[in-house]
Image (cartoon, helix red, strand yellow):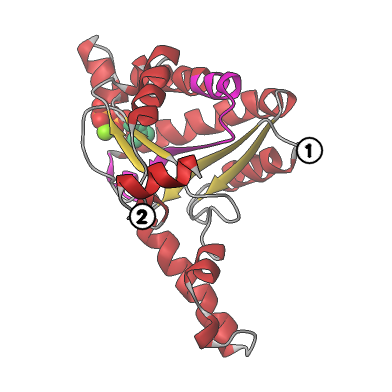
Amino acid sequence: MDGNGRWATQRRRPRAFGHRAGVQAVRRVIEGCIRRGVGVLTLFAFSSENWSRPAGEVSHLMDLFLRSLRKQARELAGNGVSLRFIGERARFSPELRAAMAEAETAAVVNPRLTLNIAVNYGGRWDIVNAARELARSVREGRLDPEAIDQATFEQSLSLAPLPEPDLFIRTGGEARVSNFLLWHLAYSEMYFTPVLWPDFDEQALDDAIAEYAQRERRFGKTSAQLREAAHA
Ligand code: IPE
Ligand code: MG
């Protein structure tokens, strides 16, 4: 979700104004995903690198995060949204960690949407974390190093047991991954749009999905092989 600051600057308003508008865009996109039958949505809300922003902006973001969570967690659960957070939580305030834990325990059976919010997340952190966890299991004699393959490795990553994303959307015009789900994006379709996050609405979501529908996902195979498989 990129472009909140520029959206505000274009309106001669402080960046905080853009972040608030960004929260409204989050609500719209969650509703849009539910209506369209999207099963899993993962939002990159705050990266492990975002701590380097000016202290005032970081504390405003933390505040906004806490307030939005307190206000919306119950409503999300009521709408059949199962909420999870991925990322390193130790750096957040105790109140924020408590609010996150509480939002996650508002159990939803058969969720209409699984919503992952990546906070203090980094794709490299996720991979290193998984490696450390596996190393610990080996040291404790619970795991044979020879048994480590891609499938077991993936089970130690923070998105497990969810599938890897079909579609990656980055708003705000930059064409980079910025340390998001590095492992999981290996075969995701990439979609970059100049639309600034606060302007990302259901039409923008439909545009992204329409573009996705045009893509041919070959996973290393040839087009001819895919056609044969479709007719078999
Ligand atoms: C994304 O918008 C929101 C967060 C990283 C929290 P930005 O704040 O990066 O907006 P721009 O890139 O400055 O426009
Ligand atoms: Mg940005």
The tag on residue 207 is none
Give the x, y percent position of residue 174. 21, 34
Height in image: 203 above or below 130? above
Give the x, y percent position of residue 98. 65, 45
Amino acid of disc 1: Val
Of marks 1 and 2, which one's residue comes earlier in the chain? 1
Is residue 3 shown to the viewer in this render?
A: yes
* Residue 196 image-quadrant placement: top left
Q: Along the horizontal axis of the image, is 110 left or right of 143?
A: right
Image point (42%, 64%), residue name: 127
From the image, tell me which residue sits under label 2: 182
The answer to if 34 sits in the magenta stretch is: yes
From the image, tell me which residue sits under label 1: 109
Amino acid of disc 2: Leu
Height in image: 88 above or below 30? below
Height in image: 121 above or below 230? below
Find the magenta span and give its range: 29-53
Q: Along the horizontal axis of the image, is 96 left or right of 11?
A: right
Image point (54%, 49%), residue name: 163
